[in-house]
Amino acid sequence: MNKFPVTILTGYLGAGKTTLLKSLLDYAKENGPRIAILMNEFGEIDVDAKIIKSSNFDLVELAGGCVCCSLTGEFNAALLELASMKNPPEHVIVETTGLAEPDAIIVDLQEAIDVARLDSVVTLVDCDAFTKYPSLGHTGRVQIEMADLLILSKADLVDKSIIADISEKLREINDRALIAVSENGKVSPQLILANRSDKVAGVDKSKINRNHLQQIQSFVVPLEQPLMEERFNEFVYGIDSSIYRAKGFVKLTDGRIILFNYVAGRADSEEWQDQIDNSYIVFISTQNITEEIKINLEEGLAACIED
């Protein structure tokens, strides 16, 4: 069984997690990825569907093949139940409570759960609250330390000059994560979901998506020949720092197929059991992907081909 990716969404009470979840659900309805959202309670998520009582969660079926789940049992058991669904999710988002530290869930996903894997940790930082109450406390600090992506929410409520100061303070705690600025809960879904491009016919090698806050640029490198695993692992360590995410299917010279995932300098892969039509890697950045970076990526992958 292929593992589905799990994003942990954390951040203090009132940071905007529910607003972000709503925007991701809206995106899923329009673009088709089946996502499941695991919450401690349904909260303010608007649902127009019948609640189905299940052994490990209350399940609400949403439009577009998505589901929203209120946890009533153990986390591991809930994920097992999602995996056993007729149409299991393609991505799971776990919203923790504002008072929760994400370490335990991270450890479970990395060590104890067979049906899911950790994709990324996203932490919302309320700019307005951070300015008024700069003392983070232990929980707030851990939420920031664990993050792959730090989203500065409610940026419209503070002076623009303060954003740089907040970013600098966050960098002192976590110098690895990407920092993205969000107003009204808007952030590019690509940064969180990193949808697979095998669902898009005729992938454009320089596809650019924009919203009113920031530019997201993605660059696709098709892999027409199998790669040597050892050389590919060396390539991963040299990925340019401007690349926040990389994801794709890689055929290896020993016949295996791996699903490769890279986020904020952290890389992992898993053996993929199903057949795939195309082998490729998508590179995602919030900065301009220059021709030099593209050439280096292409040449680096070409060097992984067996001589």
Image: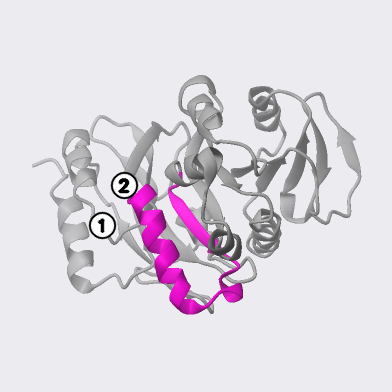
Classify the position of the C terminus by image quarter: top left
| Mark 2: few/some/many CA within 10 Å (<14, 14-19, 20+) | some
- Secondary structure of residue under mark 1: loop
Circles 1 and 2: CB distance less than 8 Å?
yes
Residue nearest the viewer, comparing 70 with 251: 70
Determine whether 109 is above or below 13 in the image. Answer: above
> Looking at the image, which residue sits at the far top?
112
- Asked if residue 1 can be seen in this view, the reply is no
Dividing the picture into quadrants, the one containing residue 133 is bottom right
The amino acid type found where label 1 is placed reads Ser
How far from the left and from the top, in percent, is residue 111?
A: 46, 22
Stretch of the chain drawn in magenta: 147-176
The residue to which callout 1 is attached is 241
- The residue pinned by badge 2 equals 265
| Badge 1 or badge 2: first in the primary sequence | 1
Residue 292 pos. (x, y %): 17, 69
Figure check: 152 above or below 13: below
